[in-house]
Amino acid sequence: MPRFPKPAEGSWTEHYPQLGTGPVSYRDSVDPQFYEIERKAIFKRAWLNVGRVEQLPRKGSYFTKELKVANTSIIVARTTSGEVKAYHNICRHRGNKLVWNDMPLEETSGVCRQFTCKYHAWRYDLDGNLTFVQQEGEFFDLDKSRYRLVGVACEVWEGFIFVNFAKEPEQSLREFLGPMITDLEGYPFDKMTSRFHYRSEVKANWKLYMDAFQEFYHAPVLHANQSPTAYSKAAAEAGFEAPHYRIEGPHRLVSTSGVRAWEMADEMRKPIEDICQSGLFGPWDKPDLGEMPAGLNPAKCDPWGLDSFQLFPNFVMLFWGQGWYLTYHYWPTSYNTHIFEGTLYFPQPRTPRERIAQELAAVSFKEYGLQDANTLEATQTMIESEVLDDFVLCDQEVLIRHLHTETAAWVADYRSKTAPAGQGV
């Protein structure tokens, strides 16, 4: 019979009394007007992760990112000095999208010395300077120095590239992340260069999918068919509780113990897992990554399963005890749709067997992700029915409570700062 960990500190929700214990409204996930304010209050003020430095391996490397939630497209580039910079993807002449290939709305990447507009061939260097204007003499008192690319605040932390669309960000990136996140410094992100990526359009509010990965209360039920009947029945009856939750500023963490798949009974494993020595929890052969940073495994679980760090607003870093990590991004496209991106990172495989083990882990995790996504459209449609106004949450769903509370707080703060003088919020 499998053993299921119990929390060491009792009620987690009561550790954060500011969150309350009453029912939670999901109005923020069905109201188009709230979404429009949310875009300005959150996604144009918070630091947003848009990629990693490995996507910019050399001087002149660039990629574009389509960000409908901010109503823009950006170029992220490595300059000739090696600095990472970001710009709005718009030509200063007539407003054409500057960098794109055959399909203007698709993202692209490459290497260049300068960006050339497809419309009238204006050129900009990697630092955003306007360097060439076709038939420049035809213009009236044109001062090219006044027509640089429009920059976007850009900072890098541990190889993760973040941007901020505020004209003057209220905090530096490091201040925004806070100690719970910066305590992850020293993790060998730079060694995790074997990358698997998937992307899906989901017909649900972005917060609903984040909620799905912020608790493990659902795991023994929703994922039951991935395990033998005897195991899944026992798991559903026993339930599952993570041993550690933490909230710091706008960010959240859930940490839990794990299982050693190869020590499970034979009937609890799939034949392909024995053949490839891999599965949902990753390859069985754990790489030697050296000493882990202080921020990981705060509950000191043995064996340690995973830590899921939820960075506000829409970025997740999930570290596995087996020596790999993955990221999630949830990019809103409307009040009831978003783009979900999942990316898995492993050390470079040394043998074909190691490569196959990584691929099995990637497809296994994609299957679980699809199972989580499968419920979301049903959830969205029924919440939009407005049959119910609010919903009860259990202690394990404390991070869900926090996400919706934090979202409301950012919106309220924005309204207070933008309300006309003398007018209430």
Image: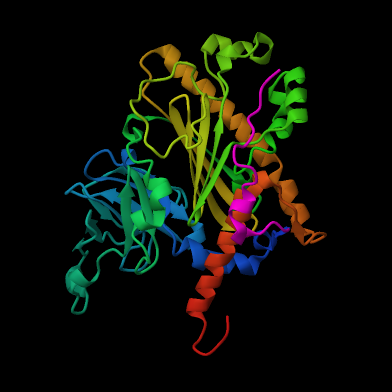
**Above or below for 75 versus 183:** below
Toward the viewer: 150 or 118?
150
- Is 250 left, or right, of 27 in this rendering? left
Identified at 51% across, 28% down, the residue is 304
Residue 19 lies within the magenta run: yes
Residue 25 lies within the magenta run: no
Toward the viewer: 230 or 129?
230
Identified at 57% across, 84% down, the residue is 424
Toward the viewer: 59 or 106?
59
Which residue lies most toward the front here?
9
Identified at 63% across, 52% down, the residue is 14
- Quarter holding the C terminus is bottom right
- Is 65 left, or right, of 279 in this rendering? left
Q: Quadrant of residue 346?
A: top left
Residue 331, x across and y down, in percent = 53, 52
Which residue lies most toward the right here?
387
Residue 371, x across and y down, in percent = 67, 35
Identified at 62% across, 10% down, the residue is 271
Residue 65, x across and y down, in percent = 42, 51
**Above or below for 384 versus 202:** below
Residue 259, x across and y down, in percent = 58, 22
Which residue lies most toward the bottom here?
422
- The magenta segment is 1-22
Toward the viewer: 89 or 315?
315
**Above or below for 119 versus 393:** below
